[in-house]
Image (tube, helix red, strand yellow):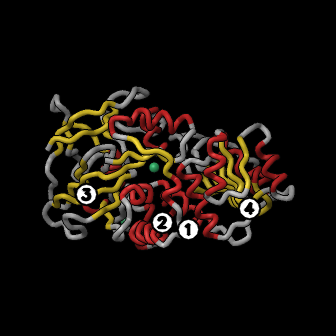
Amino acid sequence: MKIKAAVLRELNKPLTVEELELDDPKSNEVLVKIEAFGVCHSDYHVVTGLAKQELPVVLGHEGAGTVIEVGEKVTNVEVGQNVLLNWFPYCKQCPQCFAGNTNHCKTYMEMLGKGKMLDGTTRLTDSNGRPVLQLSGLACWSTHVVVPDIICTKMPKGTPPEIAALIGCAVTTGVGAVLNQATVHEGSSVVVYGAGGVGLSIIMGCVLAGAEKIIAIDRSTAKEAIAISMGATDFLLSSEDTVENVKELTDGLGADYAFDAVGNTDIAQMLLPSLRERGLALLVGVPPTDSRIQIDATDVFRQEKRLSGTIYGSVDTEVDFEKFAQMYLDGKLPINKLISKHYKLEEINKACKEMLDGSIARGVVTF
Ligand SMILES: [Zn+2]
Ligand SMILES: [Zn+2]
């Protein structure tokens, strides 16, 4: 069938919205009509080349839609169901899955990480007959996708597609980081660098966990109102004095937890200095491939500060996607507040630009 999708043909160039040919789903594959997708900074890392990916490729890894056709042997979803698209499915059969570390399962990542389906091919072809890759095996910056069935997760009835889409990346990454990896404790102090989709999700998670002081930091004053409305107790505009300002707000000690929601090495190096003794720093945003950070060994040794990371919120996607959707429906996670602007597919370059400007929290494209 003919579809429309946002294609990246050259690094650091605008995306082109093109008509592509989408093949029918093969065995264990599903055709999904995309209803909504989020514009995530990680997609843009592909545009700049910070994340390596062969081109041409259709971007998009934060999406949700409706199943309109299933291939042979598909048993987990049916036609008509609303599904979230998962960029990190797991196999349940490898040592990591058996150990409960399902977000470290490598079984599907080799192919999906290259932008290919599990048989090593793609379902997309351009008007010159050239294959077009699918980011994360998913490629949801598109009107329709064919994806492996394991990528599709059923959503509770009544979950709006744009909410499901954001659970597919930003919300799970941020809320999961707080609840699963940091296990932020009640009454604690937290500093969150970056108040975009992931940073605001971290703030939502900290509110749920009962953190007492939640300091949001961003380079744009446009984020102050939304950060405060989502539960941040303080907002700082990033500056040379940021670490000192964090200390001032935390009795001169530093915070119990520090999160980098951006994936920036300069920020990563500010995390340990922002902490008090025994504090925990987490890299949550995607750092550039092969980047290095410098840390003060004394911070780790004498101050017993800890530095770790979290991929996809260290969640079990099979359990937590549905849990987060239900928490939204129950009014416990105000995911709708993350969405500051809606776009059309044709406006994808504008959506990317406004994300980079730092003026919006999460932009979503709806159909
Ligand atoms: Zn993302
Ligand atoms: Zn596995």
Q: Distance between the residues labelled 3 and 2?
A: 20 Å
Left/right of residue 78 with respect to residue 296 in the rendered view: left
Q: Distance between the residues labelled 4 and 2?
A: 25 Å
Q: Does the residue at mark 1 contact the one at mark 2 (Cβ under 8 Å)?
A: yes
Left/right of residue 33 with respect to residue 91 in the rendered view: left
Q: In the rendered structure, which amino acid carries the disc numbered 1?
A: Asn
Q: Does the residue at mark 4 contact the one at mark 2 (Cβ under 8 Å)?
A: no
Q: How far apart are marks 4 and 3 (CA)?
A: 42 Å
Label 4: element kind = strand
Residue 19: x %, y % from top left = 21, 35
Q: Residue at point 45% right, 62% down? A: 103
Q: Distance between the residues labelled 1 and 3?
A: 27 Å
Q: Can residue 306 be seen in this view?
A: no
Q: In the rendered structure, which amino acid carries the disc numbered 3?
A: Pro
Residue ID for mark 2: 315
Q: Can residue 145 be seen in this view?
A: yes
Between discs 3 and 2, the one toward the N terminus: 3
Residue ID for mark 1: 180
Label 3: element kind = strand
